[in-house]
Image (spheres, rainbow, N blue to C red):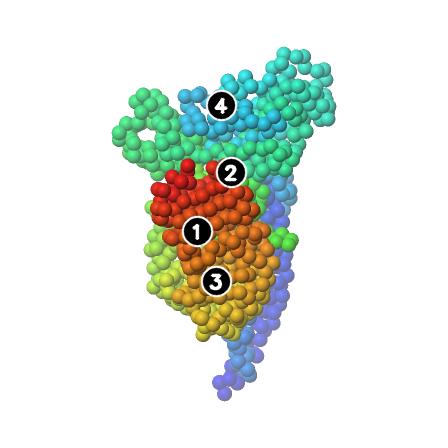
Amino acid sequence: MAAEMAVSFAIDHLLPLLTEEVTMLRGIHKELAYIKDELESIQAFLKDADRRAATDEESEGVKTWVKQVRDVAFRIEDIIDDYMIHVGQQQQQQQLQQPGCAILICKITNLIKTLKSRHQIASEIQEIKSCVREIKDRSDRYGFQRQQEGSSSRENDKWLPGREAAIYIEEAQVVGFEAPRDKLINWLVEGRAERTVVSVVAMGGQGKTTLAKKVFDNRKVIDHFDCHAWITVSQSYSIEGMLRDMLQKFYKETKKTLPDGISTMDRMSLIDELRNCLQQNRYVIVFDDVWNVRFWDEIQFSLVDNKNGSRILMTTRNMDVAVSCRISSPFVEVHELQPLTLDQSLVLFYKKAFQFDFDGHCPEDLIDISRVIVKKCNGLPLAIVAIGGVLSGRKKNALEWEKFCQNLSAELEKNLHLDHITKILGFSYDDLPYHLKPCFLYFGMYPEDYEVCSRRLIMQWIAEGFVKVERGRILEKVGKQYLRELVHRSLVLVSSRYHNGVKVKYYRVHDVLREMILTKFKDLSFGQFIGEGDESMPVSSRRLSLATNSEILMRGDKMSSQFRSLHIFTRNLDEDILCRIRQDYTLLKVLDAEDFNWYSVPINIGNLVHLKYLSLRSDYSYLMSISKFQNLETLNIWGVNLHLMPKELSKLQRLRHLVGNRISLTQLKDDIGGLISLQTLERVEVDDNEIKIIRELGKLKQLRVCGLAIKGKHVESTLCSSLNEMQHLEKLSLYTIGKDLDLNFISPLPMFQKLLLKGWLHVFPEWVPHLPNLVKLTLKESRLMDDPLKSLQNMPKLSSLTLYDCYKGQSLHFEGGGFQKLEELHLEGLYNLKSILIDKGALPSLKKLSVWNMPNRKLKILLPPGIHRLETIVVVNIENASFEFLREELS
């Protein structure tokens, strides 16, 4: 009877609402399609606004208007994401519906719950459409247009602020350039007769122009060359203008009459004239501040190679500019200018800060705060000189200097004597292609001096949608290229490398650049970083980063729905905050809590439908609600205990990276093959009771990185069979625990490049030398009794070899002609080793040698007669090695 009454009530009162819902749903579909198209137009508008901002064309009114347009774009993204959540919830409810009358009852109940939300969505869409119409009208009025990639350069920039000071700085004010100055002078005046290009590369403000001018004005350089020319290039230049400028300088210097009609000559005539002028002269030309990677291609044919020792000196912020010269010129030298050391920085700072007081010396009560201020400059001369100059005019009071240091961000933004720092550094940001700008800004989500690994960063870029699809390349490879370009442009620093001194471990940005990023955060509503002692309320932005207490997250209710990225760098979150994340931050795409110890609570994150990146540090063994993360692409979960992955994980068909330090797939033993998009699987623990799991791994056809810890004794054949199915596998790490692992069944996989074997090996695997594309091999704790070098010496592409406590023998022999491509050799913990014999012709490409923890005092390195060193070695790292070995190696 109750069911019949419910059905009757539905028919009489609620079925009309069902009809209304269907009509509204169809309307929302249509309206969403419309505003999606408009969002693309708005994003094109914002690209053009970005270009206009780079050229300082915008008035304050236009800047305010652009911010409002950006807020409309955020609203469109929000409404689309909200709608997708409602659609997902509706589909889940339909799957759970019961047969019979219950279908209608559930339908009605669901309608009552969702109708109000859909009305709100429809109403919001109508408001957005009104805003879009206004955007179109005003964008036409302000003259905005679609932005073309690569056109963000400053159109009217001929001379960057502060360049005069860099060129004409007094010798007494130059600190720390003695060694690079002498090196560059030697490159210019000594060596080969062929024309040589010398490039000085560093970030803005590092002192490239100052260094080049000191070299250019050196008496040895002046006397060595017949013709000299200094040409400032900058971001906007004219080839014809530079050719005329060089001709005028050279004719004036040689006291010859300038040819008639030079002002009206075309490019080809100017090139011919310049080549004739330089044909019989040894010349040096400085091209200062080169930005364009095509610059050398455009100018090189004007500069004849007269085999007379002529030289070109370039300064640039972009390593790619220097590298581009190598394509067409065989003789190229590159010097990467390093930051000043702390001691050098202090000397420079004292010269500026106390130029009017204390005879240029720092008083005792200001030493500590001076060191703090100078450390923030990270060896950047531009910042040291500017900040020291400002403080030279202030009271020499420790309290006032401490306040200045604490408010450095505001000082850089508002102080007229400091704003040129951010302007000069800002040019590098302005010159970035549009797709690289958000990638660079993302470094501001991390705390000051924070070091981030490339995988973490790139996976987050992908989740945010920054990495663009390129035909034939996976997103991860494209992201790596983005990061390399930011490094080459001197915007991102390599902060540390692994102990072999080769592979990059972490990246970061310069502190002063980070301050510029935080300013961009406000202008672009890109994100907000709230650090210790910062009481700022969360503002309208897309990303929030917390490095302070949990109370901040309990404020700003209205803003929480806008956040797409939440980064947590504090350990002071409580249960209320975890609930807040689950309930209110429903549109998150990135949740990075890798630095937060999420140990004591069950990992029930909630219904984060849009979540693509999740990184947690927890010892809780079971990840709850995982099946709701249908868009999840990256799952990082770290802890001490074994993490048991739930069966529901197999439903995440978009999951690309599953990473932890101890992962169990026991509950997925029948379903691992469902993870069809998986590219990275690290680190999974399996034993001989889990043969089925190892067999299932062979179904992961897209796997590129695999890390397995093997406990059992009877898994070899199954494991090799599965690995042979992974035709895209690039990197394999195998760890064995307390047993020998006999792997002699793996075929030469076509993409295989990196291999790590850790654990006992009964014999050296015969298949390893037959891997045609292996570039990196690491052997650890292998207990081999036979010298493994004989098996490896003819590998065609092996460039990096690490031997760590893997060999119990007393001698290593690098035979003549062996290891032709090896560039990096790392030897560690070979405690029984007594001799290393290197034949003539062995290791011809070796650039980096690391020797660690080799305490045997009888160890000798034996070189063939007539050879005293390996010619190509650039870096040698020796730590905890015996004195006899060091003496023998260095003699």
Helix, strand, or loop for circle 1? strand
Q: CA distance from mark 3 to mark 2?
A: 34 Å
**Marks 3/4: CA–CA distance:** 60 Å
Please determine whether, in this image, residue 322 is positioned above or below residue 748: above
Q: Nearer the viewer, mark 4 or mark 1?
A: 1
Name the spot of residue 60 as percent of width and height, x first: 52, 37
Residue at image coords 48%, 33%: 337
Front residue of 196 and 813: 813
Compared to residue 601, the image places residue 435 above or below, namely above
Give how far across and how far down residue 667 sits, in percent. Answer: 46, 73
Q: CA distance from mark 2 to mark 4?
A: 31 Å
**Amino acid at circle 1:** Ser
In the image, what residue occupies the spot 51% across and 33% down?
Answer: 335
* Tag of residue 214: 4
Confirm or deny contact between disc 2 and disc 4 (CB under 8 A): no
Say what secondary structure mark 4 lies in.
helix
Residue under numbered circle 3: 763
Q: Residues within 10 Å of mark 3 (few under 14, many from 20)?
A: some
Q: Position of residue 684 (x, y in %)?
A: 46, 65
Q: Rounded to the nearest whole Å, what is the CA distance between mark 4 and mark 1?
A: 51 Å
- Marks 2 and 1, how far apart in space? 23 Å
Sequence-wise, the earlier of marks 2 and 1 is: 1
Residue highlighted by disc 1: 811
Q: Find residue 770 and report its image quarter.
A: bottom right
Q: Residues within 10 Å of mark 4 (few under 14, many from 20)?
A: many
